[in-house]
Amino acid sequence: MSSLTLSRTRTGLVAAATAVLLVATTACGASRGDSGGGPSVPAGTNGASSGATSSTTATFGTLQSPCGKGDASGATDQGVTDSAITIGYGDDRGFTGQPGLDQEIGDATKAMIAWCNQQGGINGRQVTGDFYDAAMTQTETAMQSACKRDFMLVGEGWANDESAEQTRVDCNLAAVPAFAVGPDVSNGPMLYTAAPVPVDYQPATTFFQLAQHFPQTKDAFAFLNTTLPVNASIVARSTPAVEAAGFKVINCGVTLNYMGEPNYLPFAQRLKACGAKIFYITNSPGPVVEGIISALAQVGDKALFVMQHNGYDENFAKWNTAGYADNVYVESEFQPMENASVVPAVQQYLDILKASGGKTGLLGMAAASSFLLWATAAKACGSTLTRQCMIDKLSAVHEWTGGGLHAPTDPGGNQLADCDMTLKMTGTSWAQVYPAEQGKFDCDAKYLVKVPASGWNTTLNSDRIATKFLTSGIIKPQS
């Protein structure tokens, strides 16, 4: 496909992603894979087992592959030579509070680099990946290293990204991340993601779906608050979407320590007494989520739970042997792995990750889609591969599906789609429940809810760019 604008389809796709939200105070080192044990991918190697996808692959799902042979040349920018393009990527897998956190992000980018290089790279240039493990607290260290050596950041996902945003902007390090968390990153300059999460809009599809199927819960919706620093921002941004679906939000006055509690029963008793019929869980799956769900089940609370798409987690499902989480519903902006039989892009993603021995997950799909977005723009730049050209090309992409991994989004306009689907856990398995037809999703303009400025936790200019870290020297689109 020569054009960067992809066709919008209404089947087999899902909307834009929201990010894993977790911030910690445990100190860990940030490193590139070649020195820190992460998945480093040297130029000219495939970074995967011999069973990786063949170099004859011409598509990724519905997307024509942007990778292949060519004769692009020139040392056109930092990290670009006649023969190679060096990009930075990474995750928080070294976080001691949750080892392996978001590992699927780095694994997916590594695998996509291998997939691309086997086809000939980008216009003949091989892609080199510098892996950075930010380990939650070392994002700034990772960013400083990337600023010195990489052409761009691609497919990275760091939960504490806000802490390094000033450094990224100051060194004009353009980025196509798997996700953005901080409000000044979500609407940051020189940043385009396949699954935008702008602070001024919020998806509400799942809230509307739950209100329709469980109308008895509409008078008592509560946020399960934690001491997670961004919890207040999540609540502020989500409340308009919850209310738009017809729910009445109540405050149960309970806040859990996001690092864990020694005993969840007292909190569960207070939550049950509050009378909430549906709880919105802001934490990622782990000990805190499992602890409070177990305690609520033990005190006989029958409330439903709704989570962001990061709630869709294999280990979370494996934990649910007692069925305590059978009433958990997840807003999914990406196709779940269970839909691989009806969505070719999902099956291809799984095959590529299997060949490289990587961990799979929805956040990994986000990384894969962002890599494809970046590669498509890089191909279009040819021998004029500069950050300026990349920003010009990326800003012009207004419909993107990652070949079918998610719904049509607007990376260039930093806008998510008005579509979603809802997943439900039953026992140790996940399945799509709304819409009922596997692989399809629900779309309606009312599902894209405008968030008032009071919920942004930042200031946006007329271009919807966060102003906190802006400098006069940023690279702006020229076309």
Image (cartoon, rainbow, N blue to C red):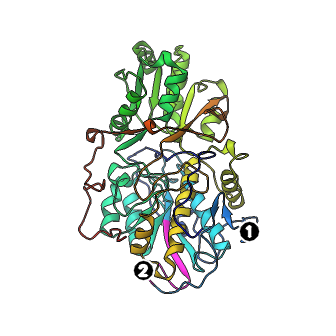
Say whether residue 103 is visible.
no
Q: Amino acid at mark 1?
A: Ser
| 393 within the magenta span | no
The residue pinned by badge 2 equals 77
Q: Which stretch appears magenta?
A: 76-88
The residue pinned by badge 1 equals 54
Q: Residue 42's x, y, as percent?
A: 59, 74
Q: Secondary structure at mark 2?
A: loop
Q: Secondary structure at mark 1?
A: loop
> Observer-nearest residue: 206 or 175?
206
> Observer-nearest residue: 322 or 443?
443
Check the picture and name the quadrant holding the C terminus: bottom left
> Observer-nearest residue: 269 or 417?
417
Q: Quadrant of residue 222?
A: top left
> Observer-nearest residue: 316 or 440?
440
**Callout count:** 2
